[in-house]
Amino acid sequence: MKNLTQEMILQCMALALKPGPFADNVCLQLPATMHELKLRATNYIQMEELKTLQTRFCTNFQPTDRKTIKLPTKVDFRPREARPPRYS
């Protein structure tokens, strides 16, 4: 196309996006440049990745009972005296 401006390209891209929060944001405030669109897309990608990580860790997390946790025993290195026999 002749005389295709960056503004026309951005509008066509905004119309071609799948419905969702990113498309809503782009349609409400059209970016002035392709660089601005790329920055917004990067921010939304990071936000979605953080959400998936959060849901993955929160759904797979199962608290453990304190009773089942065994603490390591203390090692006592002091020399001990021999005990007398119990039964004589």
Image (spheres, grey):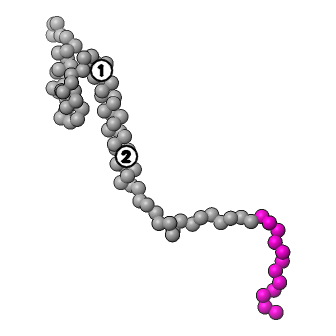
Q: Nearer the viewer, residue 2 or 87?
A: 87
Looking at the picture, tell me which residue is in the foreground, 65 or 14. Answer: 65
The percent coordinates of residue 71 (x first, y second) are 59, 64
Magenta residues (range): 77-88
Q: Is residue 33 above or below residue 2?
A: below
**Mark 1 secondary-structure assignment:** helix
Q: Is residue 64 above or below residue 5?
A: below
Residue 36 circle label? 1
Q: Amino acid at mark 1?
A: Glu
Looking at the image, residue 85 sits to the left or right of residue 13; the answer is: right
How far across and down, in percent of the image, does residue 31 sit? Answer: 24, 20
Secondary structure of the residue carrying tag 2 is helix
Give the answer, above or below, for where 46 lies relative to 7.
Answer: below
What whole-number distance in Å separates the C-alpha atoms at marks 1 and 2? 27 Å
Q: Can you say which quadrant of the picture contains the C terminus?
A: bottom right
Considering only order in the chain, which callout, 2 or 1, is on the residue closer to the N terminus?
A: 1
In the picture, residue 19 is in which quadrant?
top left
Residue underneath mark 2: 54
Task: Determine which of the numbered discs, if any, sits on residue 16 in the image.
Answer: none
Q: Residue 65, position in %: x, y?
A: 47, 66
Q: Residue at x 18, y 27 (%)?
A: 28
Q: Amino acid at mark 2?
A: Gln
At a point 77% along the width and 64% down the height, the residue shown is: 77
Which of the image's four quarters has the N terminus?
A: top left
Is disc 2 surrounded by few (<14), some (14 to 19) or many (20+) residues within 10 Å?
few
The residue drawn where x is 28% and y is 18% is: 34
Between residue 60 and residue 36, name the one nearer to us: 36
- Residue at the image position 81 percent from the left and 86 percent from the top: 85
